[in-house]
Structures are given as structure tokens and as C-alpha cells.
Image: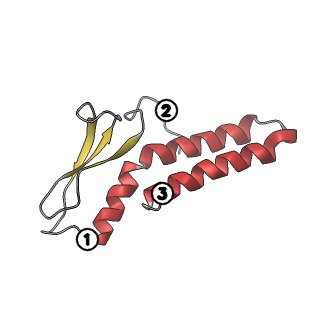
Amino acid sequence: MASHLPSGKHTQGDWHLSGQFDADTTVEVVVGDVPGEEMAICEIVPIGEEWSEEEIANAHLLANASRMLASLNEFCRVVASEPQETLVAALRRAYDQARLAIAKAEDRA
């Protein structure tokens, strides 16, 4: 198994959700910060007539996949390249980035 995905194999950028979790509506995972200029990555629809808590949690997880991948790649880069003298501080920064990515994926940030 590869240690990480090569860049360029997925849409680069900061992904986020666009839309509301209303009945019978589509929510999109998009990239871009300018309304109207966002690029859709995928559309997510509820399985039933209403969004379940699990479906909403899954949408947040999908929307933060690129951020979590970036955090993991940064962690691997730090471990592989940081000098021993500064490794602990660098690992702490990588840990903080990973915790933020997790919080966003769990819709807590």
C-alpha cells in the first residue's frame, strides 16, 4: 500500500460544504471561497426524505477529506525530514493541524 496519494490525483484546494441539510435537497462538496465561483467536487443527497445525523456527519467527513490528507502528508513529511533537535515541536504543530482537521470533519470547528 502506498504511504500517501500523489498530488494531482484529487481536486486540490480547501474543500467545504455548500447548501443546507433541508429535506429533499442536495448538498455539494465544493472547492473555492468566492460564492458563485466555487467548483463542485460531488453532490450528496439524503437516502430518505430527511437528512439523518449519520448522513450529515458523513457529508462533513467527505468535505474535510482533503484537509485530513494534507495533515497526514505533513505529519509524514515532518517525521521523515525534521532534525532530532526540533522534532518534538514540529510534531506538535503537525498534531495541532491534524486535530483541527478532525474537529472540522466532525463539525466541531
Badge 3 marks a residue whose secondary structure is loop
Q: Which residue is mark 2?
A: 6
Q: Count residues near mark 2 (Cα–Cα under 10 Å), then give few for <14, some for 14-19, many for 20+.
A: few
Amino acid residing under circle 2: Pro
Between 32 and 102, which is closer to the camera in this rendering?
A: 32
**Which residue appears at 38% of the width and 35% of the height?**
10
Q: Which residue is mark 1?
A: 52
Amino acid residing under circle 3: Ala
Badge 1 marks a residue whose secondary structure is loop
Percent coordinates x, y for residue 68 in the rendering: 50, 48
Percent coordinates x, y for residue 55 in the rendering: 28, 65
Q: Earlier in the sequence, mark 1 or mark 2?
A: 2
Amino acid residing under circle 1: Ser
> Which image quarter: residue 25?
bottom left
Q: Quick check: can you spot residue 2?
A: no
Contact, CB < 8 Å: mark 1 with mark 2? no
Is 89 above or below relative to 39? below
Is 44 above or below relative to 53? above
Single out the residue that lies furthest toward the right: 85
Between 23 and 68, which is closer to the camera in this rendering?
A: 23
Q: Count residues near mark 1 (Cα–Cα under 10 Å), then give few for <14, some for 14-19, many for 20+.
A: few
**Which residue appears at 66% of the width and 37% of the height?**
77
Percent coordinates x, y for residue 90 in the rendering: 74, 43
Real-space Cα separation, disc 1 to disc 2, in angstroms = 34 Å
Q: Earlier in the sequence, mark 3 or mark 2?
A: 2
Real-space Cα separation, disc 1 to disc 3, in angstroms = 20 Å
Q: Which mark is residue 109?
A: 3
